[in-house]
Structures are given as C-alpha cells and as structure tokens.
Image (spheres, rainbow, N blue to C red):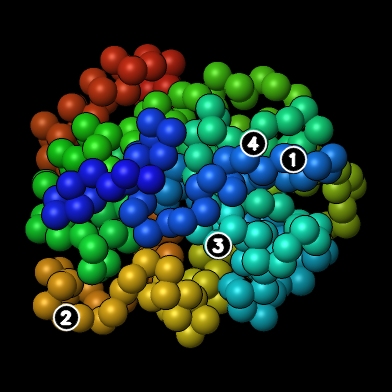
Amino acid sequence: MAVVDKNASIPYAVFRDFYVPVHNTFFGQAADYNPKVGDKFIVSYPKCGTTWMQHIVYLLHNRGRPAEDHGKVLSAIPFVEQDGFPNGDRPYLALKYHLPFRLIPYSNKAKYIYVARNPKDACVSYYHFLKPLPRYHIKSFDEFFEAFLSGQIPYGHIIDHIQEWYEKRNLPNVFFTTYESLSNKTEETILDIAEFLGFHELPENIIQDVVNHSSFKFMKNLVDGDFMKQYLRSSTGYNGNENRCLSGDLEPRMMRKGVTGDWKNYFSEEQSKRMDECIRTRNANLIKIWED
C-alpha cells in the first residue's frame, strides 16, 4: 500500500484506489477472502456501530449471555482488516469489516449486516477516536471536519461508503440498518436482526438479555476495559506520549457517549448546511434517512 503524505495531519494509505489507515496490514487478506456458506459479515464506516453490532450478533449466538471481555468477542468476530484471521480457518460467528461494497468479499452464500449512521454524528465520533492517536496531528474539530467532508481520510468519504451499501439494501442477504434505529428502536431492530440471521422465535427473556447486555452502559465497561486499552494501543501505535495528544485526551476509546444528535454540540450552522448539501449532491435519497 502506498502511503499518501505521512506528514499530513491525517495520513492515509491507498489500497486498490481506496483510502485506508496506514497501520492496518491485512487489507489484501480481508478483500481476497472467499466467503463460505453461512458466513456473516458486519460492516460499517468507522464509528458507525460495528462494535455495537458485533456484540449484538455475539449475544444472539450466545443466547443473551455476555462475553467476559471484548477480547472474547474479537476472537469470535475478528476485525479482519486489522487483525486478519487470528484463529486460522476455524469457523467464526461473524467477520467485521469497514470496506465499501466494491471491495467486500461478496457471495450470495453469505449474509451481510450494514450499519449506517448520520454522517454528522459519525464525523464527531471519528474525530474523538482519531485525535489521541500519535500518527495523527489533528489540531481542532474544524480541521477534521474539512478533511471528513473532502473524504481525504482513512476509509474515504462516508457518503460514498453508505451509498454503495444502500444501493444493495434490497438484496435478500443484505440487512441495511442505522445507528439511529438501534438507538431509538432497540428491541425491534434486534428482533429484525435475529430473524435475518435465522434466530426465529427467541424467548422474550433471551431478547431482553440481548437488549440489556448490548446497552451502552453495559458495553462501555466491557469494551473500554483493560483488554481493549492494550488492544487499541498495540493496533494503533498509541504510546501514551502526552505531547502527541494535543487535546489532552490520553486514551483512545472505542465508546464515548453512544448517543444520537451530539453533532449539534460541534457543528456550526454553516458546517451543518455544507454537510447536508454534500449528502444531497452525492445521493439525495440518503438525506431522507436522517431528516429530523
């Protein structure tokens, strides 16, 4: 992979004409994987709900019983672009990806869950995730917003990413949902996911266990525990150097607030209008998903 200006505030590499993080090394293995019958894929743009969906799928398979820590979930549902296939060829409950549809290993023998998120909230969450990491030199939200809007960041433009999957939403083996649906209609959405994956007529107590054990409060303690801190440090190059963390936020975190609408605390009126116009220009249909 060719690295594009590694001295930029938000460096990225190029993999098959797609912008990717400079630290991930398994993109070839991830993109060239040959799906097997029954494989399940969990996909989204970064900071749009893949970790949340990982836990929901894990809980459905485990009849509502939570993992001891996030490491157990990663072992069962690996983030392939970052970790490859840590347990070799043995079956996994599902596979986590951030790739767009054109690069995903697609097969009608497999099932795909895609989670879209309001691009404004995704922008804020992505900003908070990247800013503590030492290879990024993000001075302000305004700076990050410009890069996000241009798509010159790891994983490219969020609208293009969502659009590729939105166009495939009617395929029988694709389940297209949103972060907002998971937040506002949690039990209903989980029931739809269960049905899509073949978990028919689950008892109410199991559904409630899945709902409770995938709540933000429960997951934050599990995901942002000691295991995940070490995992993020090793996988992102974080070294705890305070001078590299311009915000003073010294720990990279997977989970921050778990809310919708937080963008209103960051976006100016002009930035909000520019994002809306960007969505309309690239795909006018997508704006309907997040209209208040």
Q: Tag 1, which secondary structure?
A: loop
Precedes in sequence: disc 3 or disc 4: 3
Q: Nearer the viewer, residue 110 or 200?
A: 110
Residue 4 in view (yes/no):
yes
Residue 3: image tag: none
Q: Residues within 10 Å of mark 2 (few under 14, many from 20)?
A: some
* Disc on res. 35: 1
Task: Determine which residue is flagged by label 2.
Answer: 242
Quarter residue 109 falls in: top right
Q: In screen coordinates, is 133 left or right of 180?
A: left
Q: Which residue is mark 4?
A: 105
- Residue 83 bears which disc, if any? 3
- Nearest to the observer: residue 247 or residue 153: 153
Tell me which label, 3 or 1, sits earlier in the chain.
Answer: 1
What kind of residue is marked 4?
Pro
Q: Earlier in the sequence, mark 4 or mark 1?
A: 1
Asked if residue 244 lies left or right of residue 78, the reply is: left
- Spatial CA span between label 2 and label 3: 27 Å
User: Is residue 124 something that shows in the picture?
Assistant: no
Q: Are marks 3 and 4 in contact (CB under 8 Å)?
A: no
Q: CA distance from mark 3 to mark 4?
A: 16 Å
Please state which of residues 165 and 29 is positioned toward the viewer in this rendering. Answer: 29
Name the spot of residue 132 as percent of width and height, x first.
24, 68
Look at the picture and state if 114 lies above or below 213: above
Query: Horizontal and vertical percent for residue 129?
Result: 32, 61
Badge 1 amino acid:
Pro
